[in-house]
Amino acid sequence: MSDKYMRAALVHDWVVTPGGAERCLAVFHELYPKAPLYTLFYNDKEIRKLGFAQEEVQASFLQGKKTILERYRNFLPLFPYAIEQLDLSDYDLILSSSHCVAKGVLTRADQLHICYCHTPVRYAWDLTHRYLQENSLTRGLKSTIARMVLHYLRMWDIQSSNRVDYFIANSHYTARRIWRAYRREATVIYPPVDLEIFPLLEKKENYFLFVSRLVPYKQAELVIETFNRTGNELKVVGDGPQLNRCHRLSGKNVEIMGYRTGSELAEIMGRARALIFAADEDFGITPVEAQACGTPVIAFGRGGVTETVIPANGNNWDQATGIFFFEQTVSQLECAIGQFLDWEGNFNPLVIRHNAERFNSLRFKADVQAFINSKYQEWTKS
């Protein structure tokens, strides 16, 4: 079948709040504007922002649950079953955007399923023990139930990976995790950054910046505690379950700004002395956005950030875009901030911006389209 007549469908875990995965989904919608979206549940406002009309979206039975948007993690045990109830039998190409269960939709042998994998389910694999600790599930009946659910999810996750014909990973780090969990190869195509939204700003102000959802693994508490000690000015942008705790922990030099987006976020990011990024992420789009603004990054040197930030060594100022620290501790972050202050004047915003241009949206769109076209042509000839 010619790709001229190919019928495509998009699958995404859920659409509740905007993030890097949703930016990828928006590009997939541009590539296949006639393709409907299948998802577990969604927020009407965010769906419209992505360019979908409500009639183009098919949700699972979870959409009808009253508390689904506010407490969707409570419904985790139902996710595998719910995604399997979505009927995609009318399509030739299934393009799933998966960080949880989207890759597990049921398909036939004559359908091509390509998965853009943001990560294997992190709380079922890498973050299992941290997830249990942070939710006070280390002992007792609730702990036993939670461990059984996560065990089931791991088994289902491995089995459902066989429903994917080709994996695309958002970083080499994610590709290694896909191999570790599923024993499947993945082609790496880095996610897109909208460079027009995040313009270069060479004039910096006196504050450091932390931008993130305020959830435990993002390490907001670590960052705030460190800046309480150093006394440097810090702005914290984001919201989430730890928002009130961050307010309580913050000293006079720390400003909790809440959620910001678009041009307002770009302005805050562009004026910062440096972005602090303390999480172990599969890709981490925020450090790339900061670099697009010409802002250096002080980052925990593990995960996808090692592929997007070029660490300074004192002699590579024609390439350097940030500084790494290698333990998620106050002392290590404090040392990295001190090193940054010693070298701050050597960072070149133009060099930093140039590095971010590797991740532009046009490159992402072209690479994804070329990959899908190639695999679809192979598929139809086999």
Image (cartoon, rainbow, N blue to C red):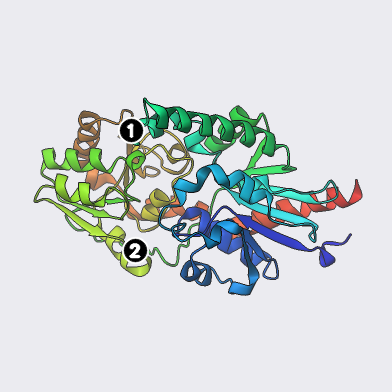
Which amino acid does the dot numbered 2 rest on?
Ala
Query: Could you tell me which secondary element the residue under label 2 belongs to?
Result: helix
Quadrant containing the C terminus is: top right
Q: Residue at x 47, y 71 (%)?
A: 45
Q: How many residues crowd around disc 2 within 10 Å: few (fewer than 14), some, or many (20 or more)?
A: many
Q: Residue at x 63, y 73 (%)?
A: 55
Q: Position of residue 242 (x, y in %)?
A: 27, 47
Q: Is 350 situated left or right of 23 in this image?
A: left
Which amino acid does the dot numbered 1 rest on?
Ser
Specify the label residue 136 is tagged with: 1
Tell me if label 2 and label 1 are in contact, CB under 8 Å.
no
Q: How many residues crowd around disc 1 within 10 Å: few (fewer than 14), some, or many (20 or more)?
A: few
Q: Position of residue 248 (x, y in %)?
A: 15, 47
Q: Residue at x 35, y 69 (%)?
A: 263
Q: Is residue 361 visible?
A: no
Q: Nearer the viewer, mark 2 or mark 1?
A: 1
Query: Could you tell me which secondary element the residue under label 1 belongs to?
Result: loop
Residue 182's quadrant in the figure? Answer: top right
Specify the label residue 266 is tagged with: 2
